């Protein structure tokens, strides 16, 4: 709750205390006849104070961690239950009518928001992805910068921030490029391509509980533009980006399609932001290394 609301509630409580001080005898008679109401008011005041303290403790202890949003949401729901209890004590028929009206109106008016909250709670409580991970969802690749109960925020390769309602994320397929090394598994295609040794080398570079990001790009190059030793063509580029990424990129040939060779590039780093920043320059440098003569010829023809 915002500080302004807290100040208003504090003023109301002080006003009630002043009235109680000057009119304590009539109030005492009233509460003697309505002791349930008296205890209900005391419980609500106590619940509000405990709520404020718990929220501040959660924010100090958990900071910006995603579980803090869930904890604050649960605390507020429990506090609302105490308010409804006070309404029922004041007037049971009125309380039942108000609660029924609120339930129906909230479910109809805020149906999408409730769906977002439910989806957000499922995302926060699951391990599908975390803040700082590089993922792809709804045809957008980017780093997760925020996960709230209402929306998820992604920063794509161009630096553009996209807000996705949690229902869109929860109901869509998600590709997670950031994972722990202990979660790494080889697909059947990779096993056929004999990448077990590469994976062992990768596990030697990264501790099993460390997270790393792996982005895959497939390139097709005309066979007549390739030199006899592709590894020598790519060596300088791989050396440069090994320093930038912290892990040397990986490549392997896939298949030959007519007059083209298809091969896969894997861009790896412990820092997903390095992958985002260096992927496009890396692909440009790879293209230039493999087809430098063709690019120079085209430039001369354009002149």
Image (cartoon, rainbow, N blue to C red):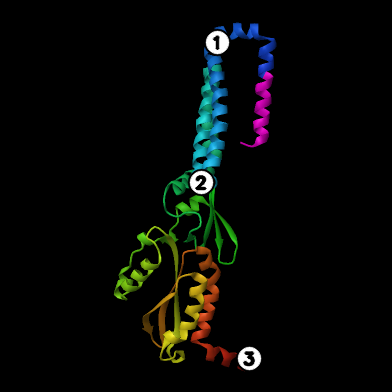
Q: Which residue is drawn at the image coordinates 57% and 32% (left, top)? A: 52
Q: Quadrant of the C terminus?
A: bottom right
> Would residue 299 be visible to someone looking at this image?
yes
Foreground residue among 235 and 91: 235
The chief SS type of the magenta part is helix
**Which residues are drawn in magenta?**
1-15
Instruction: Check disc 1 and report the residue beneath it.
Output: 34
- Taking depth in this image into account, of 165 and 155 the one nearest to the observer is 155
Q: Which residue is mark 3?
A: 302
Quadrant containing the N terminus is top right
* Mark nearer the N terminus (1 vs 3): 1
Give the class, few, some or many, for how many residues have Cα within 10 Å of label 2's Cα (few <14, many ≥20).
many
Tell me where residue 251 sits by quadrant.
bottom left
- Horizontal and vertical percent for residue 294? 53, 90
Check contact, mark 1 vs mark 3: CB within 8 A: no
Q: Is residue 3 magenta?
A: yes
Q: Position of residue 21 (x, y in %)?
A: 67, 12
Q: CA distance from mark 1 to mark 3?
A: 93 Å
Nearer-N-terminus badge (2/3): 2
Q: Position of residue 223 (x, y in %)?
A: 42, 89
| N-terminal label among 2 and 1 | 1
């Amino acid at each position: 709750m915002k500080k302004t609301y807290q100040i208003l509630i504090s003023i109301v409580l002080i006003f009630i205390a002043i009235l109680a001080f000057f009119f304590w005898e009539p109030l005492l008679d009233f509460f003697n006849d309505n002791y349930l109401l008296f205890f209900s008011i005391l419980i609500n005041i106590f619940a509000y104070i405990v709520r404020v303290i718990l929220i501040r403790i959660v924010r100090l202890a958990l900071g910006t961690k995603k579980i803090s949003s869930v904890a604050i949401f649960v605390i507020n729901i429990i506090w609302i239950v105490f308010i409804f209890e006070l309404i029922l004590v004041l007037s049971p028929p009125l309380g039942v009518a108000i609660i029924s009206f609120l339930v129906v109106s909230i479910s109809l008016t805020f149906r999408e928001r409730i769906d977002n909250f439910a989806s957000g709670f499922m995302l926060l409580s699951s391990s599908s992805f975390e803040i700082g991970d590089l993922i792809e969802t709804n045809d957008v690749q980017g780093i997760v910068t925020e996960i709230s109960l209402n929306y998820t925020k992604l920063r794509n390769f161009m630096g553009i921030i996209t807000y996705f309602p949690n229902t869109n994320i929860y109901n869509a397929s998600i590709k997670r490029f950031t994972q722990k090394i202990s979660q790494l598994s080889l697909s059947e295609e990779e096993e056929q391509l004999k990448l077990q040794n590469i994976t062992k080398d990768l596990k030697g570079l990264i501790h099993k509980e460390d997270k790393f990001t792996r982005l895959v790009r497939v390139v097709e190059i005309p066979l007549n533009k390739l030199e006899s030793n592709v590894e020598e063509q790519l060596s300088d580029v791989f050396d440069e980006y090994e320093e930038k990424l912290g892990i040397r990129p990986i490549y392997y040939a896939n298949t030959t399609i007519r007059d083209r060779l298809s091969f896969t590039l894997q861009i790896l780093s412990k820092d997903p932001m390095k992958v985002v920043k260096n992927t496009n320059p890396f692909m440009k440098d790879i293209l230039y290394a493999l087809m430098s003569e063709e690019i120079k010829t085209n430039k001369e023809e354009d002149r």
